[in-house]
Amino acid sequence: MKPRVLRVVILIAVLTGACRQPDGAMPMPDEDVSNSIGDLGRDMQAIARGETTAKKDFADDLWGLADEDTAQQPAVLQFAERFADALASASLTEQSAQQLAHTSWLLVGATELSERQIREMQGELRSQLTSTGIPQDRVDAIVAEVPTLQRAVTTRPRRWYEIL
C-alpha cells in the first residue's frame, strides 16, 4: 500500500512541476522603437531637470510605445505618472535614463510575460531606480504598478493550470 501512495505523490509532484507557466517572448526593438526609446530616455532626463512639459511628453511617448489599445491606456498612463513623479529631482545620467527607458518599453511592449518574468522585470526596475538614488518609497510605488500594467497589456491567455 505504501509504495502505491508514494507513486501517486511522485506523479502529482511531476505533473504540477510540468505545468509551470512558460516564459513569453521578449520583444526586440527595431529602428523606430529604438529611436522612441531614446526619446523616452530624454524625457526622463527632462523630468529629472524639472522641465514643465516633460511629464506629459513622457506619458505620451510611453503610450506611443504600447499597442495603443484604449483598454490599456489607464494602466499605462498611471504607470507613466508614478514613474514621472519618482524621477522628479533624480540624478539621471544619460546611460541610466536609457536603461530605464528600455525597461519601461519592455514593460509596456512585452505582452506575453510569465509571472516569473514579471518578477524579474520588477527586480531589474527596482535595481535601476535604486541605483539612481530615488528614495525607496518612490521605487516601491513604481515597482508595485508593474503587475497591474502587465495585466493591462498582456495578450497571453491564462492556462487552465494557472487557475488551479
Image (tube, rainbow, N blue to C red):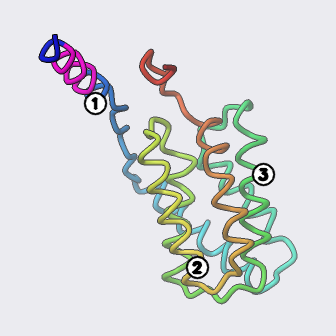
x, y percent for residue 134: 68, 81
Foreground of the two, 39 or 161: 161
| Mark 1 residue type | Gly
- Span colored in magenta: 5-14
| Mark 3 residue type | Gln
- The main secondary structure of the magenta stretch is helix
x, y percent for residue 92: 61, 85
Please say if 41 is above or below 57.
below
On residue 17, the disc is 1
Q: Which residue is mark 3?
A: 78
User: Circle 2 sits in a helix, a strand or a loop, which is it?
Assistant: helix
Give the Cα separation between the discs numbered 2 and 1: 34 Å
Tell me, yes or no, whether the highlighted magenta stretch contains residue 4: no
Which residue is rendered at x = 57% and y = 59% of the image? 104
User: Circle 1 sits in a helix, a strand or a loop, which is it?
Assistant: helix
Please say if 48 is above or below 102.
below
Instruction: Point out the tag, 3 or 1, that comes first from the N-terminus.
Output: 1
Q: Which residue is mark 2?
A: 130
Q: Is residue 17 left or right of residue 21?
A: left
